Amino acid sequence: MGTVFACVAAMGAISAAIGTVYSIGWLILAGGIAFIAGALGTPSGASRQ
């Protein structure tokens, strides 16, 4: 019974860690895309006008 609980707790901790890394990765990816879009959008927007 104790080993089952320990296994479930370990899996929960691993999934929580993966979820944290995953969400941080998405934040970095979204920030990078927004930065690139802003860097590309500013000169092209200025030249279009």
Image (cartoon, rainbow, N blue to C red):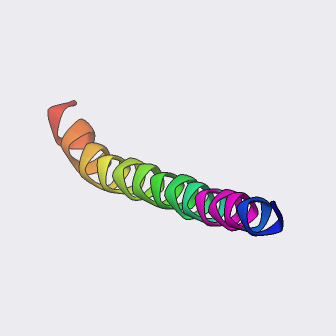
Asked if residue 24 lies in the magenta stretch, the reply is no
Q: Position of residue 44 (x, y in %)?
A: 19, 43
Q: Which residues are magenta?
A: 7-15
Q: Position of residue 14 (x, y in %)?
A: 61, 66
Q: Position of residue 33 (x, y in %)?
A: 35, 51
Quarter of the image for the C terminus: give it: top left
As drawn, is 34 to the left or to the right of 8? left
Name, please, the residue furthest toward the front: 1
Main secondary structure along the magenta-highlighted residues: helix
Q: Nearer the viewer, residue 49 or 42?
A: 42
- Reply above or below: 49 against 44: above
Q: Nearer the viewer, residue 22 or 42?
A: 22
Query: Which residue does the image show at 24% across and 51% down from the upper left?
Result: 40
Q: Quadrant of residue 5?
A: bottom right
Q: Quadrant of residue 29?
A: bottom left
Query: Which residue does the image show at 76% across and 68% down from the upper left?
Result: 6
Quarter of the image for the N terminus: give it: bottom right
As drawn, is 48 to the left or to the right of 26? left
Q: Nearer the viewer, residue 39 or 11?
A: 11
